[in-house]
Amino acid sequence: MRHGRWRFLAGALVPALVLHVVFVLSPYAQAFYLSLTDWTGVAGEAHFVGARNYARLGGDSLFLDAVRNNAVMLVVVPLVTIGIGLFLASMMHLGGRGGRRGIAGSGAYQIVYFFPQLLSLVVIAVLWGFVYNPNTGLLNGGLRAIGLGGLAQSWLASPALALIAVMAVLVWSSVGFYVVLFSAAIDGIPRELFEAALLDGAGGWATFRKVTLPLVRETVQVAFVYLGIAALDAFAVVQVMTVGPGGPDGATEVIGLSLYRNAFTYGKFGYASAMGVALFFATLTLAVLALRAGRKERLELA
Amino acid sequence: MNRPPLAEPYPTRRTLLRTALAAGVAAPLLSGCVTGGGDDADPAAGNTGAKSADNPLGVKAETPLEVVIFKGGYGDEYAKHAGTLYTRKYPGAKIDHQGLQKIGEALQPRFVANTPPDVVDNTGASRLDIATLVAAKQVTDLSALLDAPSFDDPAVKVRDTLLPGVIEDGTFGQTPLTLNFTYTVWGLWYSKSLFAAKGWAYPKTWDEMLALCATIKAAGIAPWTYQGKYPEYINDPLLSMAAKTGGLALVRAVDNLEPNAWKAPGLISAAEAFAELAGKGYLMAGSEALTHTEAQAAWSNGKAAFIPCGSWLESEQKDVTPPGFDMVMGTVPSRTAGDQLKATAVQAASSESFLVPAKAKNPAGGMEYLRILFSKQSAKAFASTAGTLPAVAGATDGLTLSSGLGSVRDAVTAAGAETFTYRFRTWYAPLAKALDDATGELVNKRITAAEWAQRVQKAADAIAKDSSVQKYTR
């Protein structure tokens, strides 16, 4: 009996474990090793160069631009997305008259907000590329139509606006998912708590701050990790949409794009792997910090 | 097999898998001995036959041949046609023809595994970086092919049937390694019918260009547009202008990464010319954010008079150009009266680059295939359908050409020996990126010509100093 159980366990676990090792762990190990070589990507041999690739990172001005842009995105994208997501989710649940239910038609909104999630990121980037077109785009066209033609801009081609334009797309594309996520979290809060708050005379803002927010805290934290990882990537949108890509003049360069260019355009797979390893540790650190930060107070709803 | 473990480790998937399974993280220490064995064997051993007047490259008739072709705007029928001629000559040979778009994705693992095909058309957006391939010694020396008699006329060598510059374009160090099949010419494009209707004459000097731009602007049309999302398009006329001013010495100095090459008066003055073009508002508003498709469509629809582009423009615009537009290419106007090259000089380079991998199983067959492809009859068949010039001289003789392609052929004829091309873009891709970024800033009035030269020179110096980059000279 016991013997059969072990066999069952092994049968269930080993295939998954092997797949994981082959397709997840081994490429990681490979990248770590390649980052210490001068591998070109087209030959079966590579030479060990030690930490030289890592030393080069610090002097690569385009890579430093990328780090700066990713850092900005890491702060802005999660904050704005979570802010909008929480606002919309709580409006859909508590924004209605009297604060007891959502505003009218909240179910329909929830579906509409989720739409961008159904599109591939590349499609989104292409569509927004059209929207941002300075001459025929929807954005400038709309501004001109309402008499604000003076505000029309060459969105993706001006260094001051390009990164903001990219971040807006990232926020737009992900906010719907977090609305749904936060809605589910708010649904999990017992109704009585809101009613009690209402009876105590709490307004919408106070209810949100004192009841909703503390009780969805863990969901927000998870959202932070996901969004942080997305903000450290952003490769697809930048590659498809921006001038250059990564421009103008490095204004929207991201680490993923630098990595891609070094590997596939310049044939420097070793150096690109070093970027990948650096990005890996940045992401890992972010995840650990974000999950540690809020571990302390865990509210129990009895 | 007694290699020192760290001298030449082979980072293939197989080695890493094994080591990762066996030793976890300590992968590199064990990987040295795993795949070392078979790599030194010559994969072409036994696949060459006796050389003869009819078979100058020593093809072994029944050896199969694998051909990988980039199937882009020109399709791959022309390559299949060459394959048919090959099997007609060697009926025992089986040709495995593959027309692909993602050349790099398909072939990178095969180069790494030392099992590449016999002929590769390394072209398209995902092509492999040729300088990297060359530095990794993955490409066969084509001297034997160039010295072989041509397929059409045994009295003429292959090297004497090509347009000027084609062999140089594929030469790295002293060795010819790739052979480019199409011949691209860069210039400024305009609508002949529009210019005739308005009474505008194509300018020969930059001063005339500026004067004409003022007229065009007054007529309510933007004088220029460019493919702003990819600033390399507007680099081409800038660099052409500089080459005309400074002559081939300037071009060589740039390619050889000589100190202060980018601060040559010819380059500064060309950069000033384009800064002035932008400063006077002669570039269509919004161009800086347009893709090549959007900018070219605006030009085809008459929103702008000039657009810089290579000779592929006509076929690219086939579906969006109104009838009667009659696009033609003009050469970049002279900047000064003392220019080293005439106004008719053109920037021309061959592209669509064919190579025979060093580890190919049938290199003799690969070269023979190229000898057939670069014959006049194959090239003519290509020119009649592809709408672009082949790299074979005289391939368009007797063909009726469209207005654009006709103007390109006339430009090549008028230029005579005065064709030039820069090589740094293929030799040093990071320098090309730095230049594109700087030029984008220049024509958007965010930096001056002097700052432009400063920035590009800095990038060139960085490459020159970098010992990990293989250097070439011309």
Image (cartoon, rainbow, N blue to C red):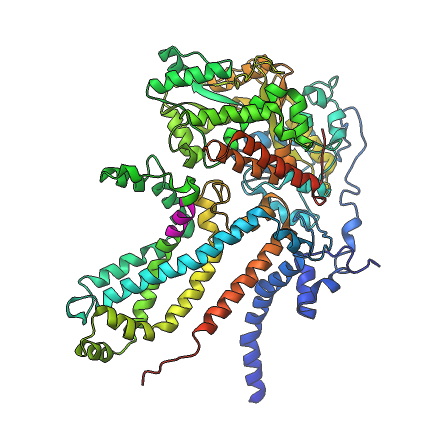
Residue B457 in the image, given as x and y percentages of width and height? 62, 35
- The image shows residue A290, relative to residue A56, as above or below, that is below
- The image shows residue A207, relative to residue A37, as above or below, that is below
Residue B415 in the image, given as x and y percentages of width and height? 60, 15
Residue B419 in the image, given as x and y percentages of width and height? 62, 19
**Quadrant of the image occupied by residue B153:** top right
Residue at point 64% right, 28% down? B373
Which quarter of the image is occupied by the N terminus of chain B?
bottom right
**Quadrant of the image occupied by residue B166:** top right
In the image, which residues are magenta? A161-169
**Quadrant of the image occupied by residue A95:** bottom left
User: What residue occupies the far bottom of the structure in this picture?
Assistant: A1
Whether residue B253 sits left or right of residue B100 in the image: it is right
> Which secondary structure type mostly characterizes the magenta part of the structure?
helix
- The image shows residue B227, relative to residue A99, as above or below, that is above
Q: Is residue A162 magenta?
A: yes
- The image shows residue A26, relative to residue A173, as above or below, that is below
Residue at point 61% right, 38% down? B431
Whether residue A152 sits left or right of residue B157 in the image: it is left
Which quarter of the image is occupied by the C terminus of chain B?
top right
Q: Is residue B123 visible?
A: no
Residue placed most toward the observer, A157 or A43: A157
Q: Is residue A232 magenta?
A: no
Whether residue B360 sits left or right of residue A87 in the image: it is right
Residue placed most toward the observer, A302 or B137: A302
Residue B414 in the image, given as x and y percentages of width and height? 58, 12
How many numbered discs, if any?
0
User: What residue occupies the far left of the structure in this picture?
Assistant: A97
Residue at point 64% right, 20% down? B247
Whether residue B33 sits left or right of residue A205 in the image: it is right
Q: Is residue B145 visible?
A: yes
